[in-house]
Image (spheres, coloured by chain):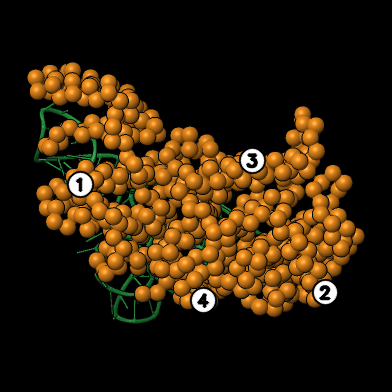
Amino acid sequence: MSLKVYNTLTGTKEEFLPLVKGKVGMYVCGVTVYDECHLGHARAYVAFDVIRRYLEYKGYQVNYIQNFTDVDDKIIARARKMREKSSQKDLKELVREIAEKYTREYFEHMDKLTVKRVTQYPRATEHIGEMIELTKGLIRKGYGYQVDGDVFFEIGKFKDYGKLSQRKLEEMRAGVRVEVDERKRSPLDFALWKHSKEDEPSWDSPWGKGRPGWHIECSAMSMKYLGESFDIHAGGQDLIFPHHENEIAQSEGYTKKPFARYWLHNGFVTINREKMSKSLGNFFTLREIFEKCNPRVVRLFLLSTHYRKPIDFSDDKLNNARRSLERIDSCLREVERRKLSAPAARPCRGSIYRTRFEEAMDDDFNTAAALGVIFDLVSKINSRLDKGDLSSVTRVASELRDFCGVLGLSPESGQETRLEEDLMKLIQEREEARREKDWGRADTIRDRLRKEGIILEDRPQGTTWHKIRRSFCLENNLLLL
RNA sequence: GGCGACGUAGCCAAGGGGACCAAGGCAGCGGUCUGCAAAACCGCAAUUCGUGAGUUCGAAUCUCACCGUCGCCUCCA
């Protein structure tokens, strides 16, 4: 069975065939480290993390590169603001600090979302030399022109300009409504190199002191780490134009070879159906969301819609995801409890579920459909457990774990198996009370433990307990009131 | 203005010419289990896929029109 991916470049789903058999080179545009990550970032990196995981599941060796833009106008603007306020520090120093801070935070948040680390995270500032070389080459080949200390890319010289965003040059001109830099030959020409002001971060170049334009870094770094042509280039839909269009122009203008072969773009996160964005002020940072919600819940929420479609965010929808996740978790917990777990089985010989799961994922990474299979598996396991038919539970459960792993939704390992002594004692006390049919006391203890985040369940085989996350506690406490 | 996406039960969401009188989740309802719960199980719940017309033996799925929502064309995941 073959994997099909939707390619923005052609506007169709195509069979995925990597350049080199068994290997995939994949580049995803990373963040500009000038502010906190928000849900939109989470969506993109979770989506491409799942794609990476699935490619690995299929047996590919994935070389996954993601950059950090650690020098650009926004970071500099931020640094200026900071300096105005209090700091005596040098602007360049501040830029470095800001970049470092938000890079660190990026990793913290992605770790919580169980986004696996990619192969390498190159930074723009560490590849200035490569970018200068590229820019020099582009000038030599007639695509770049210098004005004062700036270098621009002349889009009119690249005949395929617009092929990714499926636009014609004339159409775009009509739409341009930003003030135009008069020195540019076309309003759509973009900067390869910008001269910088005295106090700004800068590097020596043939055009004087300056810094690279935004688009050139991705061309330079993807080429360096993945070669002049590679398999997958991905990012948010908002990067299609102009960022990715410009990358293509630069890279293909320079190498005369096809750049990325498959372009994948994720849809936006919306709030009340409007794009979440800084300018609208309707964005939620991951920090805020994680304060009240388990990151796994966020991840499940994000995967419940196909990655190319818009996904609308609300507390209500998070709660929905929360309950769904609890359904998976309680199933796995029960399997564990009955000692029916086994390591995730990988042999792909087809159960009907595995076939369905792979069909879903092969169809442009349809995680929503794949989740449907996961829940069918959960139902099957629960049903078997209920009937006491344990014969195939171990096998089915390992399949379930396997699929959860591909989506990055495996429960945290190392479930707590011990309770503080006083809490253990309370549970025993309740057992006694129940034996004596002192229901009042039993219920008091149960409620009290619940407030501690410990859920008791009386089963035919005896009482069980499990801890719940604070986020779950909050909700359950509300239910108690 | 140009280009594009979407509209499926109370909510989320998959499907994208016949196996669909439409998967799965949440919420809901009835039952089983329980001291009561919780969890779980069994069952019910869209005769219908924005509206209208058309193509077809057959349409949620294709075509056209209309209505509605959103996005890109400017930094943005």
In the rendered structure, the residue with mark 4 lies on which chain? A
Secondary element at tag 1 = loop
Query: In the shown orientation, is residue A40 left or right of residue A409?
Result: right
Q: Which residue is mark 1?
A: A339
Residue at image position (47%, 61%) is: A52
Horizontally, is A207 left or right of A297 in the view?
Answer: right
Q: Residue at x 86, y 55 (%)?
A: A209
Residue mark closest to the camera, 2 vs 4: 4
Label 2 or label 1, whichever lies nearer to me, is: 1
Alpha carbon distance from label 2 to label 3: 38 Å
Separation of residues labelled 4 and 3 (CA atoms): 37 Å
Q: Which residue occupies the foreground of this view, A88 or A317?
A: A88
User: Which quarter of the rendering shows the C terminus of chain A?
Assistant: top left
Mark 2 chain: A
Which amino acid type is marked by label 1?
Lys
Palette colour of chain B: green
| Residue A392 placement, left or right of A181 | left
Discs 2, 3: same chain: yes
Q: Give how far across and how far down residue A193 sits, in percent.
A: 80, 60
Q: Which mark is residue A20?
A: 4
Residue holding disc 3: A101
Q: Residue at x 62, y 62 (%)?
A: A240
Pointer 2 with pointer 4, Cβ within 8 A: no
